[in-house]
Amino acid sequence: MKSAKTPQEVHAVLAAAFNTKDVNVVMNVYDANGIIFPEPGKEVSGRAQFEEAVKSICAVPGVMEIKTVYCLQSGDVAVGRSEWSITDNGKTQIAAKGIELMKQQSDGSWKIVIDHAFGAEANLVA
């Protein structure tokens, strides 16, 4: 699986990783020391819990698609806004608007440090 060479590539790489349904491939897109919000109001950190969250998302049947709404970069950090969904046989299983914080790694690749999968939803209360 390829890694993101620019922050603008992160969403496409993440969708491709989730579509493998392989937890290890998905985990490679993330900085496992970061934070993921796998559902509204649920913050997960720590490698074991992070992996459990990824497993639950991978268990949703269907294909993930992620549209990049915007990606803003300053040096080795970037913030992205996404609209994503998982669709199975024409039926949307889940869809949301997310916000992701990305950081460039020492090898030049980009990984997600904070994935707030529902962070741009209109009714979200922080």
Image (cartoon, grey):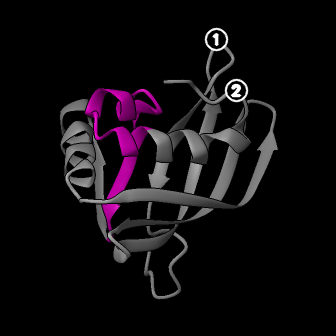
Question: Disc 2 or disc 1, which is closer to the eye?
Answer: 2
Residue underneath mark 1? 107
Which quarter of the rendering shows the C terminus?
bottom left
Query: In the rendered view, does 48 fall on the left or right side of 4?
Result: left
| SS at circle 2 | loop
In the image, residue 52 lies in the stretch drawn in magenta: no
Q: Residue at x 42, y 73 (%)?
A: 95
> For the residue marked with disc 2, what is the amino acid?
Lys
Horizontal and vertical percent position of residue 16: 48, 41
Which of these two is toward me, 65 or 28? 65
Q: Residue at x 27, y 45 (%)?
A: 54
- Sequence-first disc among 2 and 1: 2
Residue underneath mark 2? 5
Q: Residue at x 81, y 40 (%)?
A: 74
Horizontal and vertical percent position of residue 90: 38, 75
**What residue occupies the far right of the structure in this picture?**
74
Instruction: Determine crowd level at label 1: few under 14, some 14-19, many 20+ residues with C-alpha closer than 10 A.
Output: few
123 versus 83 height, above or below: below
Horizontal and vertical percent position of residue 59: 19, 52
Q: Magenta span covers which residues?
A: 17-40
> For the residue marked with disc 1, what is the amino acid?
Asp
Which of these two is toward me, 31 or 109? 109
| SS at circle 1 | loop
Q: Quadrant of residue 77?
A: top right
In the image, residue 37 lies in the stretch drawn in magenta: yes
**What residue occupies the far top of the structure in this picture?**
107
